[in-house]
Amino acid sequence: MAPEEPVPPVPPENPYQQKYVVQKGDTLWKIADEYYGDGRLYTKIFEANRDVLKDPDKIKPGQELRIP
């Protein structure tokens, strides 16, 4: 019988990435201003969430976004 191969450990979640649940009235600009202190950095959030966002102006309450 062959020895079992060790199972690699599950990598921890990226500690430099946070999650944010969109609230009514939120915009990516507001979220970027809250997290980065500069709303112009909203594109960082948009790029990190391209899989769930097709348009940076169309976010919906309840959506969970990654904040890089």
Image (cartoon, helix red, strand yellow):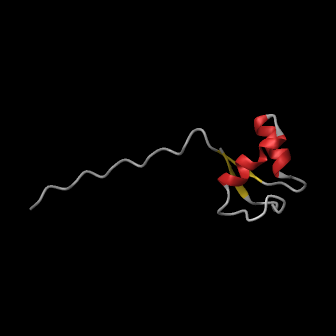
Q: Residue at x 83, y 54 (%)?
A: 23
Q: Residue at x 75, y 49 (%)?
A: 43
Compared with residue 1, is residue 9 higher up or lower down, i.e. above or below? above
Q: Identify the image quadrant of residue 25.
A: bottom right
Q: Residue at x 78, y 63 (%)?
A: 55
Q: Nearer the viewer, residue 46 or 24?
A: 46
Residue most toward the top?
37
Residue most toward the right?
25
Q: Nearer the viewer, residue 20 or 37?
A: 37
Residue 56's x, y, as percent?
79, 58
Q: Nearer the viewer, residue 37 or 26?
A: 37
Q: Residue at x 78, y 47 (%)?
A: 42
Report the number of numbered marks: 0
Residue 54's x, y, as percent?
74, 65
Which image quarter holds the N terminus? bottom left
Side of 13 where 68 appears, left or right:
right
Side of 35 where 27 appears, left or right:
right
Residue 67's x, y, as percent?
68, 46
Compared with residue 52, is residue 3 higher up or lower down, i.e. above or below? above
Residue most toward the left?
1
Which image quarter holds the C terminus? top right
